Every structure is written in structure tokens, then in C-alpha cells.
Amino acid sequence: MSATSPSVARKPSARDRLLAAADELFYAEGVHTVGIDRVIEKAGVAKASLYSSFGSKDELVKAYLQGRHERRRARMLAGLERYDDPRDRLLGVFEVLAEVAGNPGFRGCAFVNASAESPRGGPVEEVSDIYRAWVRGLFHELARDAGAKDPATLADQLVVLYDGASIGARMDEGGPKAALVARDIAATLLAAATL
Amino acid sequence: MSATSPSVARKPSARDRLLAAADELFYAEGVHTVGIDRVIEKAGVAKASLYSSFGSKDELVKAYLQGRHERRRARMLAGLERYDDPRDRLLGVFEVLAEVAGNPGFRGCAFVNASAESPRGGPVEEVSDIYRAWVRGLFHELARDAGAKDPATLADQLVVLYDGASIGARMDEGGPKAALVARDIAATLLAAATL
DNA sequence: GCAAGACTAGACAGGTCTGTCTGCTATCGT
DNA sequence: ACGATAGCAGACAGACCTGTCTAGTCTTGC
């Protein structure tokens, strides 16, 4: 029980605790609704630490969204490793989404939610665009691998399904249901696109 | 030019001016971001008038959303009158949505946006549920009329498309594009559902 | 031992938020 | 003519917001 062991039971840095608290609160209640005071209280951190780490609330919001992007990306890629067949991998995106949406704390897409309460052209739109470009790129790649005749068009369609599933799960409390509906539609579209 | 002519150039009531101002501001910038002061200034109305007409900001938000619901309903039903064939009427929903999304001020679904910045179980969720039940009912009815074998399932699918189109138009600045993508998917689904 | 850096606690400034209240004015039905 | 109703203008209270600043504490490398 050496007190300075670097790999065991180290308290996370103030920055990491802030990000964890911001992630929970911002996602659950909205980036504008939740004030700085609640974030630092949950993180157990002084206000000065927040401003020395991030500089402003906007930057904290940005970091929160970037963290969401990275974690969604990691979860999606890990989830798709289960599948070998390119067709299954494409539909697997909606399986993973269904798992995520079945989570009790699920409240829709963090980027859609944040941008609903943020001005156009601000930092939120910036990171949202990057996230959405990644989603579309992933679909494009999977559509190509699955043998779609026009992978770009199919990717556009799949993005619509992805968004619709996420909104449906948030607004209608149906858990994974909307994502599975989207999965079925995707299967129909894929069949039609590879004839 | 009688000064009291009831049908010519009457200044709208304070209540109506408030609703019009709230509609513009809340939709463009979010219900939480926009404060009471900005609404009454735009409406040219005293603060006391707002509180005597609506009682609270929450009630004003509710009235704003109810107005959106009613106008969307009227616009949709009027737009669908162009079509005779039941199949065209169903797809016409997405044509009307494309027209709406092509509007320069379009910023997605007012209910999705408002609920992103509102607590669960509040008045916003209440009116959102009513609106969404109407959308789903409309699709159900149109799916039945179009001869779908399982209109309830088709309606679920069309709701996903409707949500996805609206989010895509807001997040990706594509104007009516996402709605037309959704229309094409709907045509494919309808063909498969009426075999 | 000790200096440097990271962190905490909390006061403070300046602004904005919702909601209440007091006066004053104009219009309308009777 | 006159009372009722509707509306306007703005001060005010109390809470909450972001962001800054001071002062003290703890940890770590050397």
C-alpha cells in the first residue's frame, strides 16, 4: 500500500473530473441549463481550476462534445468488430445504436441537443459538423464495402435513418425500438441498392 | 375610413402580438435562451400584459408550441389536398416537409428543439407527445388508405424518416434535400409494404 | 528542505433571468 | 358621462449566471 503508487487508486486530475461531471450534467439537462457552479460542485473542483483548464464555459462544452464524439467512435468500431459480413457490419451500426438507446440515461444525440440551444456558427456547430461528417463517412465506407451501387446516395439515406432513430428514442421513450425500426429499413434499402 | 371598423387595419391584441414574437424568437434561438424581456420588446407589449395573459413563461412556451402544432397541421392538410392518389398523398407529406425545410428560417422541429432544453416530464413534453401522436396518426391513416398490409408498422417507419429528414435539414444546412431523400425511402418502403 | 505547480475555498463584480407591483392612459359598452 | 377593461412604462426584488481575484494548502521533484 505505497501511497504514491502511480497506477493504483489515483484520484483523477481536476480536468478529468470536470470533464466527467460536465459529460453527465450537460448531457442529462442541456449545456445551457446547467451552470458552472453545478459542474464544479459535482466534480469537487474549485472554480479557478475550471477556468485555468478550459478558459471558458464554451471551451468546456466543446471538450464535452469532443469526448462524446471520441467515445461514440470507439464504441461503434468495437461493436462492429463482431461482424464479418459487410452487410452485417452496415446493419450493425443500428444494432449498436439500439444498445446505446436502450441505456436508461439515453437522451438522444448530444450534438443535436447541444445545437438546439446554441447559436448558429458557434463552437457547437463546429464540433457537430465534424461528428456528422464522421458518421456519414462511416456509412459511406460500409455502403461501399457492402457492394452498394451508389454508396454516396445510400449513405445519405442511412444518415436520415440514424438521425430518425436517435430522435425517436429520445422523444418517444421507446428505448431501442426506433433503432430496430431503422435497422429494418436499412436492410430493405441495402437489398434494393445491391440488386 | 371609419376608425372603429372591426375588420380593417386593427392592431392585433397584446396576446396575439406576444404569441407572434414568441414564435419567431423561441423558434430561432431556443426557448431557454430567449428571455421574457426580448419577447415583450419585440411584441411592443408591457411585461404586465404578458403575465396577465399567460401567467408564466412556461405557459407562453406551451402556447407557442401549440400554435406551431396547429399551423403545421393546417399546412400539412392543405398541402395534401393537391393529391388524389392515396400513394401520392402519403409521399406528399415529405413534399410538404421539403417545402417547409427549404424556408430560409428553417431550424428543425420546434418540439425536438424545445424538448432538448427542457426537463423531462414538464409541459414541453406534454405538448410534444400530443404533436407526435398526431404525426403518427396521420401516417397511420395514410398508410392504411394507401393499402399497406401493416399500416402500424409502416407508420413507425415513416415517423423515423420524418424525424430524420427534419434533423438532417437543421444540422446539415441542406435545405429540402434530406426531406427528398426521406421521400425516396418512403416510396421504396411503400412499394415493399403493398406487394 | 524547499521551491514550483496544481489545487481548493470563497468573495466579488457585473450582468441577466423571471416575476411582481405601482401608476398612468386609452378605449368601449352602456 | 362614466365605470370597466385592457394595455403601457418602468422600477424593483431575489435568484442565478459567467468570469476574476485573493489567499491558503497539498503534492512532487530535486
Image: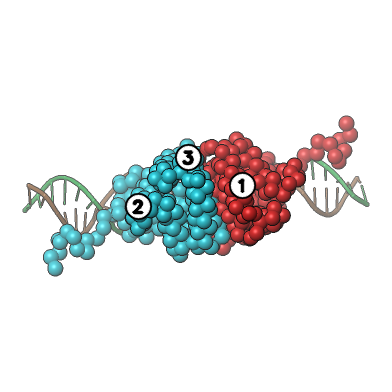
Chain colours: A red, B cyan, C brown, D green
In this view of the protein, which residue sits in the foreground, B45 or A126?
A: A126
Residue A50 visible:
no
Q: Are marks 3 and 2 on the same chain?
A: yes
In this view of the protein, which residue sits in the foreground, B68 or A160?
A: A160
Judged left or right of residue A170, residue A16 is right
Please state, as top left, top right, bottom left or bottom right, where the N terminus of chain A lies in the image: top right
Look at mark 3 in the image and give the residue it sits on.
Answer: B150
Judged left or right of residue B117, residue B44 is left
- The amino acid type of the residue labelled 1 equals Ala
Looking at this rendering, what residue extends furthest in the front direction?
B195
Residue B63 visible:
yes
- The amino acid type of the residue labelled 3 equals Asp
Residue B107 picture location, percent across and down: 48, 57
- Identify the mark nearer the N-term, 3 or 2: 2
Q: Which mark is residue B77?
A: 2
Residue B75 picture location, percent across and down: 36, 55
Look at mark 1 in the image and give the residue it sits on.
Answer: A187
| Mark 1 chain | A
For the point 22% across and 64% down, the residue is B9
Marks 3 and 2 sit apart, C-alpha to C-alpha, by 23 Å
For the point 50% across and 46% down, the residue is B195
Tell me the quarter of the picture where residue A9 sits. Answer: top right
Tell me the element at label 1: helix
For the point 53% across and 52% down, the residue is B188
Q: Crowdedness of circle 2 by 10 Å Cα count: few (<14), some, many (20+)?
A: some
Residue B18 picture location, percent across and down: 34, 54
Please state, as top left, top right, bottom left or bottom right, where the C terminus of chain A lies in the image: bottom right
| Mark 2 chain | B
Marks 1 and 3 sit apart, C-alpha to C-alpha, by 18 Å
Q: Mark 3 or mark 2: which is in front?
A: 3
